[in-house]
Amino acid sequence: MTTTPETPGGGGSTLTDERVEEQTDYRYDAGDHEKFSHYAPKDKIMQAMIEGTPVRALCGKLWVPSRDPSRFPVCPVCKDIYENVVHNDDPS
């Protein structure tokens, strides 16, 4: 809220209320996200399933997990990233 003086001689001030609404814009990626099961952090997937919010897969796809992933083949891009980057960086 800001206070600005009125024109001279008015003797008062005017209050201006400025409200800004923030809105999350989820734009789902077009493509094969419905054909594959994707890799993403487990905690993010669980949160997305509970809250119905999108999650970003390793391959970059944005989707809302809502189905049994075992019914679909694994996304080849996610699998490649996991096997060659994530899995190789795991010190255990």
Image: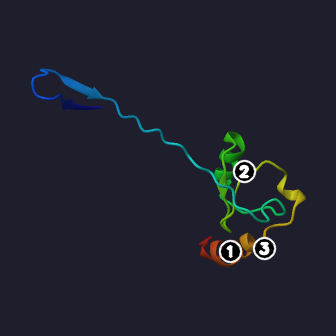
Q: Quadrant of residue 69?
A: bottom right
Secondary structure state at the residue bearing disc 1: helix
Instruction: Estimate the spatial distance between the alpha carbons at disc 2 and disc 1, rounded to whole Å.
Output: 20 Å
Percent position of residue 60, x then y: 65, 66
N-term-proximal mark, 2 vs 3? 2
Left or right of residue 90, residue 3 in this image? left
Look at 79% across and 48% down and name the residue there. Answer: 66
For label 2, the crowd category at 10 Å Cα-Cα, with few meaning under 14, some 14 to 19 and many 20 or more, is some
**Circle 1 residue:** 81
Look at 68% across and 62% down and name the residue there. Answer: 57
Q: Which quadrant is home to the N terminus?
A: top left
**Circle 3 residue:** 76
Secondary structure state at the residue bearing disc 3: helix
Q: Which quadrant is home to the C terminus?
A: bottom right
**Circle 2 residue:** 64
Percent position of residue 22, x then y: 49, 42
Numbered disc in front, either 2 or 1: 2
In this view, 56 is above or below 47: below
Look at 82% across and 59% down and name the residue there. Answer: 34
Left or right of residue 15, residue 34 in this image? right
Identify which residue, 22 or 8, lies in the foreground: 8
Numbered disc in front, either 2 or 3: 2
Q: In which quarter of the image is residue 14?
A: top left
Determine contact: label 2, label 3, CB under 8 Å. Answer: no
Determine contact: label 1, label 3, CB under 8 Å. Answer: no
- Name the kind of residue labelled 3 in the image: Pro
